[in-house]
Amino acid sequence: MEDGGRAHTAIVGWACTTLCLVSCAAAFSQGASLSACSDMMPRHLRVQLHSSNSNYVTVHTNMSFFLPGDKVPVTVRSTRDYMGFMLQARKVSNNEVTGTFIFLPPGSKLLTCFEDGDTVTHSDKSLKRNLSFVWKAPDQPIGDIKFFISIVQSYFVYWAKIESAVVAQGGQN
């Protein structure tokens, strides 16, 4: 009788753990949560942060400067597949998220962290490698920016806040 009770408890514990892991995985398979907006860190269970020096992802733009209202193409290149991501433009002066993404590739969607469309995340867990976006600068001057991306290779492995080169705001006095 005692062994039957232990077996029942073990099965119930296993079922609860499995349901929790499945529900957590499903929750983030359609994009980053709003809780990641400030620090760009995934909120998965037992994730392993890897050094940004050892990542296989780069964020590029073919523009070294922009003017207020400009549209800036942004390309994310990778040598390996990954499932999830979060992309933002941030002011160099105060790390504030800025601008709006106006072109997104398939498998991605807009996320409103602080203003409408200021962040892009994955919309499914299909494997991704090279993605292209277009970011629109605000109509008022904001100063220099950098693009930041966090990449989730798997449920347990990610790289946070991989940064682009500075894109300077032109036309400043």
Image (cartoon, grey):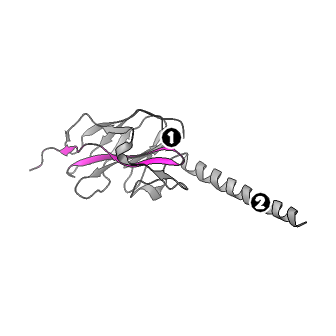
Residue 10, disc = 2
Q: Position of residue 13 (x, y in %)?
A: 73, 60
Q: Do labels 2 and 1 touch, CB within 8 Å?
A: no
Asked if 161 appears above or below 131 in the picture, the reply is below
Q: Which residue type carries mark 2? A: Ala
- Residues 72 and 153: in front is 153
Give the main secondary structure of the magenta stretch. Answer: strand
Does residue 158 belong to the magenta stretch? Answer: yes
- Mark 1 neighbour class, 10 Å CA radius: few under 14, some 14 to 19, many 20 or more: many
Instruction: Report the span colored magenta.
Output: 144-173
In the image, what residue occupies the spot 27% across and 38% down?
A: 71
Residue 83, disc = 1
Q: Position of residue 171 (x, y in %)?
A: 12, 45
Q: Position of residue 106 (x, y in %)?
A: 47, 34
In the image, what residue occupies the spot 28% across and 36% down?
A: 61
Residue 22, disc = none
Mark 1 or mark 2, which is nearer the start of the sequence?
2
In the image, what residue occupies the spot 54% across and 36% down?
A: 126
Could you say which quadrant of the image residue 165 lies in?
Answer: top left
Task: Say which quadrant the N terminus sits in.
Answer: bottom right
Describe the element under mark 1 as helix, strand or loop: loop
Q: CA distance from mark 2 to mark 1?
A: 32 Å
Q: Which residue type carries mark 1? A: Met
Q: Position of residue 97 (x, y in %)?
A: 32, 54
Does residue 41 belong to the magenta stretch? Answer: no
Describe the element under mark 2 as helix, strand or loop: helix
